[in-house]
Image (tube, grey):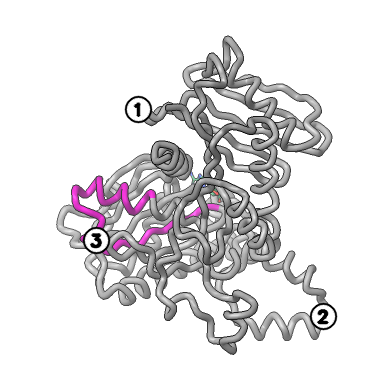
């Protein structure tokens, strides 16, 4: 069975074609600047060089057509006919409280994704554009939605409710939803496999640390708390997002400086975090370099980031009544030897001891704790696309 996985943004589209008989990736690519001058597609058939084409791509429908053309190409393609394609799986950011699992997309599901647009105003409209484009170009194909929020729907009310008047939850849907669920699910389960133990026996803290970051408490395979919330701003310090703040400070600032909600949103999402503190970059590689050469604000950003992660690990260990493993993933978690070391310093009291030489790896699966560490520390590169492909296959087979 061949499955196409799509991750549609407002002006971009990432894709991977899987052969689900062995879960291999046959081809992948990226369409960029959809609807913007200079749009292009970069396509790679596994084992071959990438091909890039700059061409007019005014909308997602044209983008999907182009992806299909590339997948059918006799040299760079990986399908001999469209009949070989069994289903399309989409990453969808927000499923609200309706979806705790992946679903086959029908009219009703489309309506719910639409209803969730106010909860994810930047992402859900783009995801919908992608789904509708596939509907037009391949009207017969089975489409599946895999939600970023779904894995966190197991959180108990005490973890997802905010301390505001309760009617704001009932009427305005203000609650913690959490994001990166597909990634947390994948790395928690993969860590259990690597440790050779059922995930149902383990208490794991998963640290997804990239440009956007979240920490999740995974108690016997279920998310019971997570650091992102109603929005993608809270939790630990991110590339350009602020992390946890005192909300009254925001009101104070808006009033004192006459800042509009829109401008404030820009500050919180785009000007804060590692960039806002360091004043130089949102990219952690730049920050590590600057901190190493004496830049104090870069060093502060690095310290704040690692201190924040360590606090969440401690808090979630307490929330779960213990901890068996800590997992690092995403761009920073997979690659930053320094961040993993700084986060782990001081976790020894929990029984988590980092092995400095084992920690000296980037981008591959490894257990990086010492032999005698009761709590295992792991690096597990995330693979959200594979989870989407697996869910899509399972739903396609179930029909
Ligand atoms: P992601 O959003 O998962 O693609 O992660 C992007 C983040 O990972 C950026 O902040 C990068 O600076 C960071 N990153 C990638 N490679 C490294 C590395 N070798 N060392 C430190 N940070 C890295």
Q: CA distance from mark 2 to mark 1?
A: 58 Å
Task: Give the residue at the far left of this rendering.
Answer: 372
Which residue position is annotated with label 1? 22
Beta carbon at label 2 within 8 Å of ligand 1: no
**Circle number at residue 359:** none
**Judging from the image, what secondary structure is the residue with disc 2 in?**
helix
158 or 233, nearer to the observer: 158
Of callouts 2 and 3, which one flags the residue occurring earlier in the amino acid sequence? 3
Q: Quadrant of the N terminus?
A: top left
Please name the residue shown 35% across and 55% down the image: 327
Q: Is residue 383 visible?
A: no
Of callouts 2 and 1, which one flags the residue occurring earlier in the amino acid sequence? 1
**Judging from the image, what secondary structure is the residue with disc 1 in?**
loop
Question: In the rendered structure, which segment of residues is drawn in magenta?
Answer: 186-210
Label pair 2/1, CB-CB below 8 angstroms: no
Vertical placement of residue 18 versus 354, above or below = above
Q: CA distance from mark 2 to mark 3?
A: 48 Å
Which residue position is annotated with label 2? 257
Which residue position is annotated with label 3? 202
Please name the residue shown 52% across and 40% down the image: 89
Residue 5: x and y, percent?
A: 53, 37
- Is 355 situated left or right of 178 in this image? left
Does 187 lie within the magenta span? yes
115 or 313, nearer to the observer: 115
Q: Is residue 351 visible?
A: yes
Please name the residue shown 40% across and 36% down the image: 397
């Amino acid at each position: 069975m061949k499955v196409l996985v799509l991750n549609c943004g407002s002006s971009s589209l990432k894709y991977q074609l899987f052969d689900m008989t062995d879960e291999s990736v046959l081809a992948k690519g990226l369409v960029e600047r959809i609807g913007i001058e200079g749009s292009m597609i970069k396509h790679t058939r596994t084992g071959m060089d990438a091909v890039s084409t700059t061409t007019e791509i005014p909308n997602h429908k044209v983008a999907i057509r182009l992806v299909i053309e590339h997948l059918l190409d006799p040299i760079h393609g990986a399908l001999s006919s469209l009949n070989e394609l069994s289903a399309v799986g989409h990453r969808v950011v927000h499923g609200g409280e309706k979806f705790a699992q992946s679903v086959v997309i029908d009219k009703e599901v489309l309506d719910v994704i639409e209803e969730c647009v106010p909860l994810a105003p930047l992402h859900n409209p783009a995801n919908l554009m992608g789904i509708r484009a596939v509907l037009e170009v391949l009207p017969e194909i089975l489409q599946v939605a895999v939600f970023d929020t779904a894995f966190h729907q197991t959180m108990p009310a005490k973890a997802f409710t905010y301390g505001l008047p309760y009617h704001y939850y009932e009427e305005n849907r203000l609650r913690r939803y959490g994001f990166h669920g597909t990634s947390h699910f994948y790395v928690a389960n993969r860590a259990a496999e690597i440790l050779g133990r059922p995930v149902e026996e383990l208490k794991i803290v998963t640290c997804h640390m990239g440009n956007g970051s979240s920490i999740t408490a995974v108690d016997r395979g279920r998310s019971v708390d997570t650091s992102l919330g109603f929005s993608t701003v809270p939790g630990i310090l991110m590339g350009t997002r602020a992390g946890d703040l005192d909300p009254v400070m925001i009101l104070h600032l808006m009033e004192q400086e006459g800042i509009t909600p829109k401008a404030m949103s820009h500050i919180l999402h785009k000007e804060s975090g590692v960039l806002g503190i360091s004043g130089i970059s949102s990219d952690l590689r730049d920050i590590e370099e600057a901190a190493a050469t004496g830049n104090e604000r870069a060093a502060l950003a690095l310290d704040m980031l690692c201190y924040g992660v360590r606090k969440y690990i401690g808090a979630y260990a307490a929330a779960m009544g213990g901890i068996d493993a800590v997992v690092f993933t995403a761009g920073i978690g997979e690659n930053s030897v320094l961040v993993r070391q700084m986060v782990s310093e001081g976790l020894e009291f929990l029984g988590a001891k980092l092995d400095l030489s084992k920690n000296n790896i980037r981008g591959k699966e490894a257990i990086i704790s010492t032999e005698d560490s009761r709590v295992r520390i792991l690096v597990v590169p995330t693979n959200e696309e594979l989870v989407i492909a697996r869910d899509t296959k399972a739903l396609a087979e179930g029909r």
